[in-house]
Image (tube, grey):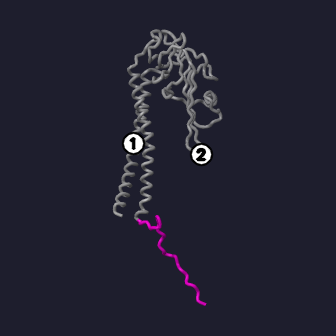
Amino acid sequence: MPQPEAHSTVGAPPEKLTLGGKQMPENLVALFPQLFCSCGSLFFAIVIAIFGVLLFRSASQRQRLQTVLAKLPLQSIATLKPGQGLVRLKGIISQVPEPVPPSLDVAVLRVVLREKEVGEEERMMDRVQARPFLLDDGTGTILVDPTGLDRSLLGEGTVPEPEDRAAALQAVGLPPSLGGLVQVWALQTGQEVTVVGTVQNRGDQMVIAKAQGQPLIISPGDISDLLAQTAKQSTSACVWGIALALIILGLLTVSGILLLRVFLTLSHL
């Protein structure tokens, strides 16, 4: 009895893609990966551009702040008047009526925790606790309300000792059992600080506090240290902004080349 012939599929050409029942040209199908890569490059360029704009904006703000600080004269507390506006003072934290617990003398406490689990991205938590304090410059005292202060100008952070680590985390509302690297910034009684803020009236008392659109800075040391910090931050933001700009230029170049190849191929179909 004759056997049916076996039909071999070895070496058979692959099925061609169809669109609306019609076969699509192979060179048109080959354009899809290029078009996808071009759109992907354009998307990432837009995302990076957003971060770049934020960085350049931050650098511009720091440069303006540096200009304001450089032109702001040092004043004494005894000469302050209500409604005087933005002033720069230098003195000693003489008293903290209600310090950051559990400490007895801390007016401002910033804690940054960087925690990274195996196989996961680094997580950063940045917390600040601040309490009003009295500033004494030898000519008088004035109450300073640190609410809304610039947390990036608190000087250099330190890594606490193991016995102080849990207390620092607890003071800013973080579980003391958290792992990771901890950095602490603390301003306390007896410390010399430079204060830049606005003179305001609260009842029958003058205070230094943050006003809308104006900086509030409480920084250890002198104005030279403060200007160095702002210059460093401005330079860092500019460098990162330039690096992102170069990455954006590269992505746009790749996207443009791929799109040009797609259009040239389509024009020859």
The overriding secondary structure of the stretch rendered in magenta is loop
Q: What residue type is labelled 2?
A: Val
Is residue 235 within the magenta segment? no
Image quarter hosting the C terminus: bottom left
Give me the residue at 39% from left, 28% from top.
63
- Reading the image, the residue beneath label 2 is 118
Give me the residue at 54% from left, 27% from top.
185
Residue bounds of the magenta highlight: 1-26
Q: What element carries label 1?
A: helix
Q: In which quarter of the image is residue 113?
A: top right
Q: In which quarter of the image is residue 112?
A: top right
Q: What residue type is labelled 1?
A: Ala
* Most foreground residue, 181 or 207: 207
Is residue 15 within the magenta segment? yes
Whole-percent x and y of residue 141? 52, 11
Residue 245, numbered circle = 1
Distance from the alpha carbon under mark 2 to that under mark 1: 32 Å
Q: How crowded is mark 2: few (under 14 residues within 10 Å), some or many (20 or more)?
A: few
Instruction: Name the front one of labels 2 and 1.
Output: 1
Whole-percent x and y of residue 132? 56, 18
Whole-percent x and y of residue 238? 40, 35
- Whichever of labels 2 and 1 marks the residue nearer the N terminus, that label is 2
Image quarter hosting the N terminus: bottom right
* Most foreground residue, 34 or 109: 34
